[in-house]
Amino acid sequence: MKLGVMIEGQEGVTWDLWRRLMARVEGLGFESLWRSDHFMSTEDSSRDAIESWVALTLTAAETTRLRFGPLVCPMTFRHPSLLARMAASVDVLSGGRLVLGLGAGWNEHEHHAFGIPFPPLPARIELLKEGIEVIRRLLGDGPAHFNGRHYQLNGSNPCPKPVQKPRIPLLIGTTGAGRMLRVVARYADEWDAPGITSPGAYRARSERLDSYCRAINRDPGDIRRCVSTAYLIGRDAAAVQRRGAMMQQLIPSLASLDPVAVPEVLRRDGWMVGTPEQIVGQLRALADEGVDRVIFQHNDPADFEALELMANEVMPAVAS
């Protein structure tokens, strides 16, 4: 199993801190580094929110080994032709290390705040499907043509093309079991199931994806399986509780809780919580269900000690 780190760059992360995080994540041996794609904080609108694709461009230029990408880009935020151009350039700059994470978008308040249309979910899914078609055509060889309801292409052939062949891997993130999971079955090279850390719940969703793949004559094994999840780690129960108290300062919805209760509340919300040994057990249970990449949402970006604990005591135990 491979382990990655995801940073919520809209939650007060500075450019200096992002650079230090990139270097530390790569130096500690994590497989990948990911950025949320938000224009503003989801917790406190006064926090700095560094732009996702500028951050990814820095990652392409200033790291040498990490896979990286957005987790995930709502198709509502950018025209897919623009997104394809950006992705191709960043892939070339990195030497072929980008994974393009895509989704339908979910944060209605954020869309309204920036004057971005937020249609109902069925329409957003249609935008996502057409947007993927546009991106795949533009990143392929030769002139691109597409005549959709929302997007059209008329012979464009942008260069440079990506380094990766046959294409930049497409990751689609969803917890849904219906329409969005059918989009995964048709288009994704990798499926991220955010916060589905229960092996039983993951198995049920994964089996549903397999059935959707078989219905369109696609091999389910063609789709890599990934789970992204927030985490709370400590060498012992007291250390876990201390980090839980720090989360209360970062996440306003936790502020009113009894600090003793925070770890269990987060566990029920799908976080991985516990000592290194306990988290290794949770990861192995997901590995048994076919998950081969777990991306840890690192909610306290200045807590390098937690990253070191994950890298030194968790990662070696699940590497094989």
Image (tube, grey):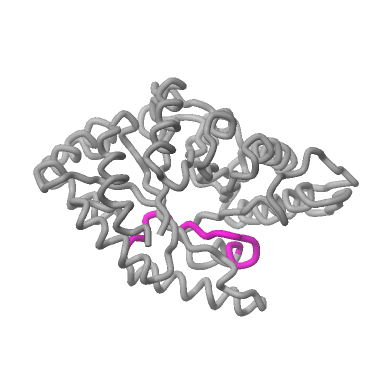
288 to the left or right of 73: left
Q: Is residue 123 magenta?
A: no
Q: Is residue 195 magenta?
A: yes
Numbered-mark total: 0
Image quadrant holding the C terminus, namely: bottom left
Image quadrant holding the N terminus, namely: bottom left
Q: Residue at x 40, y 37 (%)?
A: 25
Q: Residue at x 58, y 43 (%)?
A: 118
Q: Residue at x 12, y 47 (%)?
A: 236
Instruction: Residue 170: give x, y in percent of width and height.
Output: 61, 54
Q: Residue at x 83, y 51 (%)?
A: 141
Quarter assignment of residue 242: top left
Instruction: Residue 109: give x, y in percent of width and height.
Output: 48, 36
Residue sitting nearer the eye, 240 or 22: 22
241 to the left or right of 319: left
- Magenta span covers which residues? 183-197
Residue sitting nearer the eye, 72 or 254: 72
